[in-house]
Amino acid sequence: MSRFDQEWALVPNAARWLAVLLSLGFVALMAGIFLLPAFASGDRHALWTLVPIFLVTLFGIVPLSLYVLLIGYVYGDAGRRGMNPLLWTLLAIFIPSAIGVILYFILREPISVPCPSCGVPARKGHAFCASCGSAVRRACAQCRQPIEPAWRNCPSCGAPTSAV
């Protein structure tokens, strides 16, 4: 399964169906406004004049459909990261000009790492599982704070990490 497939699976089916229904409704509305009157009057010249305009207006639904799918992704991704999905979805919807979506991507939590012993998710700042106490990440031998593998010294206490 590719990375895109994994991320696409986060978008709820309701958001997918809403995007499809919006697209179909928009197409039907534009056909009713542009093409149906010219087709009903039998004026072929007006029909051929309005067909390009109709096709150009269809490009207007693409950003709206993508926005609906992006809001669905925010909902699914916030749940995966242990954040409040309803709150972030409402912020993404009601903060105008997609600033809510941008804020979500800036402020979202990192993905939790499952504990190798019990499987309970551990947040980024935790070196040990809150449920069973087993090590989830490398920790400093002196202060027991989580450290990255590439670090040579602990940023909390300054102890060398080579002894870990």
Image (spheres, rainbow, N blue to C red):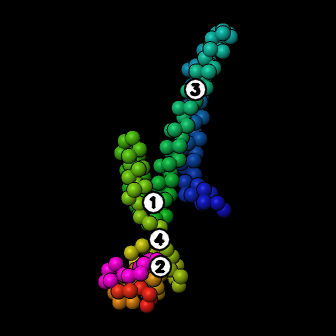
For the point 38% across and 82% down, which residue is it?
153
Given the image, on which type of amino acid does mark 3 rest? Val
Q: Is residue 122 one of those drawn in magenta? A: no
The N terminus - image quarter? bottom right
Identify residue for label 2.
Answer: 149
Task: Verify CB contact (< 8 Å) between mark 3 and mark 2.
Answer: no
Whether residue 143 can be seen here: yes
From the image, state whether disc 1 or disc 4 is nearer to you.
4
**Residue 103 in the image: above or below residue 129:** above
Given the image, on which type of amino acid does mark 1 rest? Ala
Identify residue for label 4.
Answer: 112
Q: Residue lying farthest left?
A: 157
Task: Verify CB contact (< 8 Å) between mark 1 and mark 3.
Answer: no
**Residue 101 in the image: above or below residue 145:** above
From the image, state whether disc 1 or disc 3 is nearer to you.
3
Q: What secondary structure is found at the residue carrying circle 3?
A: helix
Query: Going by the image, does 79 lie left or right of 153?
Result: right
Decide which of 53, 27 is in the foreground and name it.
53
From the image, state whether disc 3 or disc 2 is nearer to you.
2
The image quarter containing residue 65 is top right
Instruction: Give the percent coordinates (x, y) of residue 127.
Output: 42, 81
For the point 49% across and 74% down, which residue is it?
113
Label 4 Cα neighbours within 10 Å, binned few <14 / some 14-19 / many ≥20: some
Q: Find the distance from the CA under tag 2 to the CA under tag 1.
A: 27 Å
Task: Verify CB contact (< 8 Å) between mark 1 and mark 4.
Answer: no
Given the image, on which type of amino acid does mark 4 rest? Ser
Label 1 Cα neighbours within 10 Å, binned few <14 / some 14-19 / many ≥20: many
Identify residue for label 3.
Answer: 56
Q: What secondary structure is found at the residue carrying circle 2?
A: loop
Q: Earlier in the sequence, mark 3 or mark 4?
A: 3
Q: What residue span does the magenta drawing correspond to?
A: 147-158
